[in-house]
Image (tube, rainbow, N blue to C red):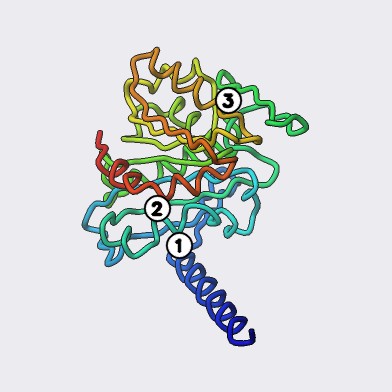
Amino acid sequence: MEIKKLVYAVLFLFVAFYAQAQKENYQKESFIQDGDTLKYRIMYPKDFIDTNQYPIVFFLHGAGERGADNETQLAHGSALFASEESLENYPAIVVFPQCPKEDYWSNAKVNRKSRPVSLKFKYHRKPTQAMHMVMELVDELVGKPFVKEDQIYVMGLSMGGMGTYEILHRKPDTFAAAIAICGGGDEKGSEEFAKKVPLWIFHGAKDDVVDPQLSLEMASKIIAYGGHPNVTIYSEANHNSWDSTFAEPELLPWLFAQKK
């Protein structure tokens, strides 16, 4: 029994050390504009050379990772890009901005007392301050000479999936592809990007936080507007459908194959 406990302890320490090592691949940075600050983490490819050009991925986290520690936003998704396989096969710049605690990526009225949460999106209004800062950060980074202008990507989960749809609406000519996980949005607002941005939509059929119907309605409207989104619904997944998404063997090959 003692040996078994020791094995578990060593395994736990190894996993913790590996996770921390992956997080350390992401440098801490701050984007400051007009007196406001957006904290973010950024990972550069192995053997980064600023005279070369690389794809760039912006990852929008969920509501539970909001804050000011510039750490929590790495909880989901950062390991996907920091794995040895990804670093070797898909050298890219990966950016994880952190939404402040009292803000939201998408301009939406959110009622968390209902289950699933009730959401009313307001794309017709100006973006939230968090979204505004992200869009400014996108412009700042994609203007760098080492970024491939034809390989700019955005993805997100939950609140970040909602933010993904909204930033596509607000910047439809910027991104080469997008991935939205357990999100939702203003379906009519998809007209701006339906034909322009390849999209892969994921959701869990048993999601009791964000209704999977929101993803289906978004996909349906995108198709009506002439788009061709990929849609994957996991029959047994609840809100954490990102776990299944990140395990998809074709996820990164598909993403990095898309070019403007």
Disc with the residue nearer the chain's start (2 vs 1): 1
Q: Quadrant of the C terminus?
A: top left
Of helix, strand and loop, which one carries label 3?
loop
165 left or right, relative to 62: left
Q: Quadrant of the N terminus?
A: bottom right
Front residue of 94 and 80: 80
Q: Which residue does the image show at 47% across and 37% down from the upper left?
A: 135
Front residue of 216 and 61: 216
Considering every residue shown, the one lying at the far top of the view is: 224
Amino acid type of the residue that numbered disc 3 sits on in the rendered structure = Lys
On screen, residue 58 above or below 111: below
Q: Which residue does the image show at 41% across and 50% down from the upper left?
A: 247
Amino acid type of the residue that numbered disc 2 sits on in the rendered structure = Val
Q: Which residue does the image show at 57% across and 45% down from the upper left?
A: 240
- Residue 18 point in image, percent of width and height: 47, 71
- How many neighbours does mark 1 have within 10 angstroms: few (below 14), some (14-19), or many (20 or more)? many
Of helix, strand and loop, which one carries label 1?
loop
Q: Which corner quadrant of the image does residue 208 belong to?
A: top right
- Residue named by callout 1: 26
135 left or right, relative to 5: left
Instruction: Determine whether label 3 and label 1 are within 8 Å by CB.
Output: no
- Residue 203 point in image, percent of width and height: 51, 35
Disc 3/disc 1 C-alpha distance (Å):
31 Å
156 left or right, relative to 194: right
Of helix, strand and loop, which one carries label 2?
strand
- Residue named by callout 3: 126
Instruction: Determine whether label 2 and label 1 are within 8 Å by CB.
Output: yes
Disc with the residue nearer the chain's start (3 vs 1): 1
- Residue named by callout 2: 94
Q: For residue 100, which numbered disc appears in the image?
A: none
Disc 2/disc 1 C-alpha distance (Å):
8 Å
